[in-house]
Image: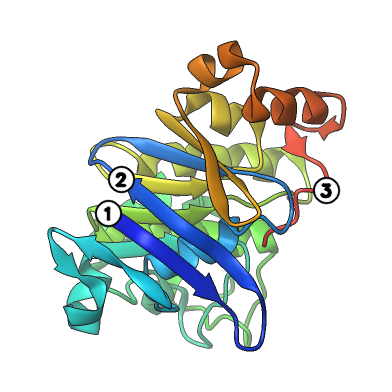
Amino acid sequence: MELRGVRFAYEGDHEVLRGIDLVLEPGRVTAVVGPSGSGKSTLVRLLPRFFDPAHGSITLGGADLREIDSRELHRKVSFVFQDVRLLRASVADNIALAVPHAGRDDVVRAARLANIHDRILELPRGYETVIGEEAGLSGGEAQRISIARALLAGTPVLVLDEATAFADPPTEQAVRRSLAALEGDRTVLVVAHRLETIAGADTVVMLEDGMIVERGAPAELLAQNGKFAAFWQSHRSRIGDGVLQGDEPQ
């Protein structure tokens, strides 16, 4: 996947992204970091085509996203964002949203990998429980349902806006394990809010005021003592459970 000269502005607003050039390679995790308002969440929302760039292009396999049928795009790009919105439908249907003819065994396998299977079995009717009518789910549980959906879809590209916090350590650990199951040979772009995620990425892209100001392997960028190193050091003293405090999604 490749972004060339991408610029974007919300209606009546200043440019949020300015001249983004970025190549995302298969089997590699790219972590996007930067201060609040730098354009991180806007950038990742362009890949599943929630928005189109005002200028420039985003291509997948050489084809512009605007020329790819939406159903075909959804078979190639899956996303897991913080603001998960589940359907008022059964748990099974929510997991199989992108693969409606998936068998129950495949749905359960994805749920196990996402560390949500045991919680589903605690619901009134298990996988047939209607979310929002028969049971509610916490934010962490909803995100694990979304992760199970992405696992079942098996798309070659995964876009992830890592959640900043969850209610308790066990939930946080379960989400971390399920995210690890998503990587493999996929192309992964993640808005990273945890130093652990940043350190484990293949490439870090540092955004500032809508522009890429630094990019490279985490260790290399730290050794350069530039903007990323300063960003890293400034947050180390403000960490709670490994989360970059005050790093609200933008």
Q: What whole-number distance in Å separates the C-alpha atoms at marks 2 and 1?
A: 6 Å
Q: How is the image coloured?
A: rainbow
Mark 1 residue element: strand
Location of residue 204 with respect to 217 vertically, above or below: below
User: In this image, 248 relative to 141: left or right?
Assistant: right
Q: What whole-number distance in Å separates the C-alpha atoms at marks 3 and 1?
A: 30 Å
* Label 2 Cα crowd, 10 Å radius (few <14 / some 14-19 / many 20+): some
Tag count in the figure?
Answer: 3
Name which of mark 2 and mark 1 comes first in the sequence.
1
Mark 3 residue element: loop
Residue 34 percent across, percent down from the top left: 65, 44
User: In this image, 12 relative to 118: left or right?
Assistant: right
Residue 177 percent across, percent down from the top left: 50, 37
Q: Which residue is mark 1?
A: 2
Residue 174 percent across, percent down from the top left: 58, 41
Q: Let me know if residue 32 appears in the view.
A: yes
- What amino acid type should be assigned to the residue bearing mark 1? Glu
Q: What whole-number distance in Å separates the C-alpha atoms at marks 3 and 2?
A: 27 Å
Mark 2 residue element: loop
- What amino acid type should be assigned to the residue bearing mark 3? Gly
Q: Which residue is mark 3?
A: 246
Name which of mark 3 and mark 1 comes first in the sequence.
1
- Quick check: marks 2 and 1 in contact, CB under 8 Å? yes
Indicate which disc residue 36 carries: none
